[in-house]
Amino acid sequence: MPAIALAQEKPALVLEPTERAPARARRYLTERFAELGHADDYIGRLVVTELVTNSYRHVGFGQIVVRILPDPHEPLTLIEVYDEGPGLPVVGSEDHDAIGGRGLLLMARLVHDWGVRLLNEGGKITWARCAR
């Protein structure tokens, strides 16, 4: 039976819900993508910025937790953002006159897939898988 090499899991990044959280999450993602050997982190930075920004703006309480993991079955990287809020993210419409509210729409078009996992203990994990 062949051995399977798994990338070592790095501790999650725990953030307070402030305007500084997205920048810290981007730095964490950049470091993690480099550790995983990814040449380009542009889409990952957009994704983590959107998810963390939504957590601190729309939830506004509790900690935000970011994890970045390689998918062991496909050449994809999983970005997870946990928050304590009960509300689900909503993809806005393609309103060309709007000055905001289209971040999830943009993100959804850039990633392989994404979704939300509600947790029994409360809160949720919003996740997205990006190509490596």
Image: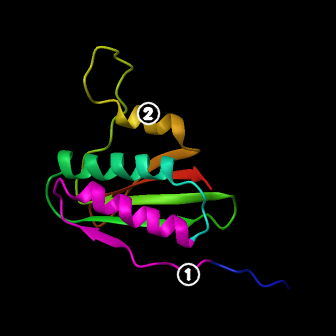
Q: Looking at the rendering, in which quadrant would you find the C terminus? A: bottom right
How are the residues colored? rainbow
Q: Which residue shows up at 56% across the image and 51% down it?
A: 130
Q: Looking at the rendering, in which quadrant would you find the N terminus? A: bottom right
Q: Secondary structure at mark 2?
A: helix
Residue 106 circle label: 2
Answer whether residue 49 is magenta in the image: no
Residue 80 circle label: none
Q: Left or right: 56 with respect to 128?
A: left
Residues at circles 1 and 2 in contact by the CB criterion of under 8 Å = no
Residue 34 lies, in percent from the top left, at: 54, 67
How many numbered discs, if any? 2
- In the rendered image, which residue does mark 1 sit on? 8
Q: Left or right: 97 with respect to 27?
A: left
- The kind of residue tagged 1 is Gln
Q: Secondary structure at mark 1?
A: loop
Report how far apart the C-alphas of labels 1 and 2 lie in the structure: 30 Å
Q: Left or right: 122 with respect to 38?
A: left
Q: Which residue shows up at 49% across the image and 49% down it?
A: 42
How dense is the environment of label 2, judged by Cα within 10 Å: few (below 14), some, or many (20 and up)? some
Residue 18 lies, in percent from the top left, at: 16, 57
Is residue 4 depicted above or below 24 in this figure? below
Answer whether residue 23 is magenta in the image: yes
Is residue 111 depicted above or below 33 in this figure? above
- View extreme (top): residue: 97
Q: Indicate which disc, 1 or 2, sits on the residue closer to the N terminus.
A: 1
Residue 96 lies, in percent from the top left, at: 35, 15
How dense is the environment of label 1, judged by Cα within 10 Å: few (below 14), some, or many (20 and up)? few
Q: Which residue shows up at 74% across the image and 80% down it?
A: 4
Q: Tell me where the magenta segment starts and ends, as one range.
A: 7-35
- The kind of residue tagged 2 is Leu
